[in-house]
Amino acid sequence: MTAHAPSARTDPETARQAQRFGRARAVQAAILIEDYVELIAELAPQDGTSARITDIARRLGISHASVVKSVARLRREGLAESRPHRGVTLTEAGRAMAGRVRARHLLVVELLCAVGVPAEVAATDAEGIEHHVSDATLGAFRRFLATRHAVEPPGQAASSRETEVARGAGPSRPNKNGRSPTASPSPAR
């Protein structure tokens, strides 16, 4: 099925709907780029290090081929560099975008925790919300948190686990036995 631009004979409502769907597709494409640069920055935090395609695919739960295709797009957009068997590194523009995306993510997590959302839920929800909030909304989040911090010091109401998650430690991953690494072992039988 091929996409068609609305013709001059298309009724106005159909043309508006096509424009809305076009904007939604553009937003989805931008979200994908942001997720990739954020993940690459996390996997290769220092200059001179690179993220392996295999690690990116594993973390995103997608195929190697899908990652290769998306990395090619990042290269075309000037956000990443890659060489065969050398992994993927971010360009200066890619690192700048990753920093902005990460800061936005942490702000959303902090706000969600401040209004009582459990830290692990906040970290998960922020993955979707962070891409859809305007600069005006982010500014309001900052102002709200600043006034809240003036009354109650940051982290005062949050548990240490919430603070870890908000700073990017993420939820505990189960080990090979399916247990949380912080969980106490089952009693011996």
Image (cartoon, rainbow, N blue to C red):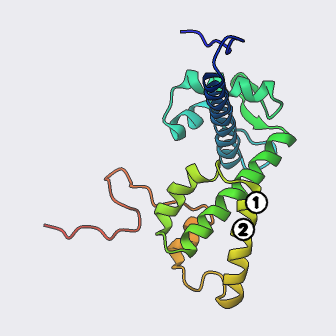
**Residue drawn at x 83%, y 38% as measured from the top left:** 91
Crowd class of label 2 (few under 14; some 14 to 19; many from 20; radius 10 Å):
few
Judging depth in this view, the residue of 121 and 184 nearest the camera is 121
How far across and how far down the image is residue 57, in percent? 55, 33
How far across and how far down the image is residue 130, in percent? 63, 53
**Residue drawn at x 78%, y 46% as measured from the top left:** 97
Judging depth in this view, the residue of 182 and 123 nearest the camera is 123
* 131 shown above or below 156: above
Q: Which residue is mark 2?
A: 140
* 138 shown above or below 128: below
Q: Residue 136 got which mark?
A: 1
**Quarter of the image where one finds residue 82:** top right
Which residue in the rendered view is the most extreme toward the right?
92
Tag 2 secondary structure: helix
User: Pointer 2 and pointer 1: residues touching (CB < 8 Å)?
Assistant: yes
**Residue drawn at x 57%, y 24% as measured from the top left:** 66
Distance from disc 2 to disc 1, alpha carbons, whole Å, reads 6 Å
Identified by mark 2, the residue type is Ala
Judging depth in this view, the residue of 98 and 51 nearest the camera is 98
Horizontal side of 95 relative to 188 (left or right) equals right
Identified by mark 1, the residue type is Ala
**Residue drawn at x 63%, y 19% as measured from the top left:** 11
**Quarter of the image where one finds residue 144:** bottom right
How far across and how far down the image is residue 177, in percent? 31, 53
Q: Residue 82 got which mark?
A: none
